[in-house]
Image: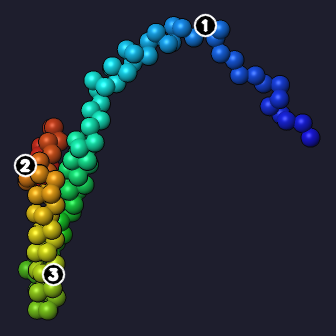
Amino acid sequence: MTDPHADKLLTAPDDLDPFARDLPDLGEALSRRLDADPENVERGLAQLVLTVIELLRQLMERQALRRVDAGGLDDETVERLGRTLMALEARMVELKEVFELDDADLNLDLGPLGRLL
């Protein structure tokens, strides 16, 4: 059996100098657009993740309050729910301290939609 791609050749221009001359400019342009400092990248990722977690935490808290107000939960469940939400909030405070973030950092501006939180 023969290789079906045997008759195909990859070719390159004879003179690659025009591309080589542009490499330093390309590197400089990319470095201006992308700040690849590991500390900033880590903090930015932490900010994004904690923002999503805070949004979900607030939604869960509101849903829990609705259920408590509706009266469909027994006292033990209400107590457990309260402890869980308090523990989650305490952990969020710890993580914000670790990454040197505050509540304002997690409240993203969504432009015409307003603030996230």
Relative height, residue 90 to residue 72 (above, below):
above
Is there any visible trace of residue 8 in the rendered image?
A: yes
Is disc 2 placed on a helix, strand or loop? helix
Image quarter in which the N terminus is found: top right
Q: Residues within 10 Å of mark 2 (few under 14, many from 20)?
A: few
Q: Quadrant of residue 89?
A: bottom left
Nearer the viewer's eye, disc 3 or disc 1? 1
Question: Label 3 to label 2, Cα distance in Å?
Answer: 26 Å
Is disc 1 placed on a helix, strand or loop? loop
Kind of residue sitting beneath label 1: Asp
> What residue appears at the point 83 percent right and 34 percent down from the top-left corner?
4
Q: Earlier in the sequence, mark 3 or mark 2?
A: 3
Nearer the viewer's eye, disc 1 or disc 2? 1
Which residue corresponds to mark 2?
104
Kind of residue sitting beneath label 2: Ala
Relative height, residue 35 to residue 76 (above, below):
above
Residue 71 tag number = none
Relative height, residue 7 to residue 99 (above, below):
above
Residue 100 lies left or right of residue 17; in this view the side is left
> What residue appears at the point 30 percent right and 35 percent down from the top-left corner?
36
Q: Earlier in the sequence, mark 1 or mark 2?
A: 1
**Depth check, front residue: 93 or 38:** 38
Which residue corresponds to mark 3?
81
Which residue corresponds to mark 1?
15
Question: Label 3 to label 1, Cα distance in Å?
Answer: 69 Å
Q: Position of residue 91 (x, y in %)?
A: 15, 68
Q: Earlier in the sequence, mark 3 or mark 1?
A: 1
Is disc 3 placed on a helix, strand or loop? helix
Q: Residues within 10 Å of mark 3 (few under 14, many from 20)?
A: some
Q: Position of residue 11 (x, y in %)?
A: 69, 17
Kind of residue sitting beneath label 3: Leu
> What residue appears at the point 27 percent right and 23 percent down from the top-left corner?
32
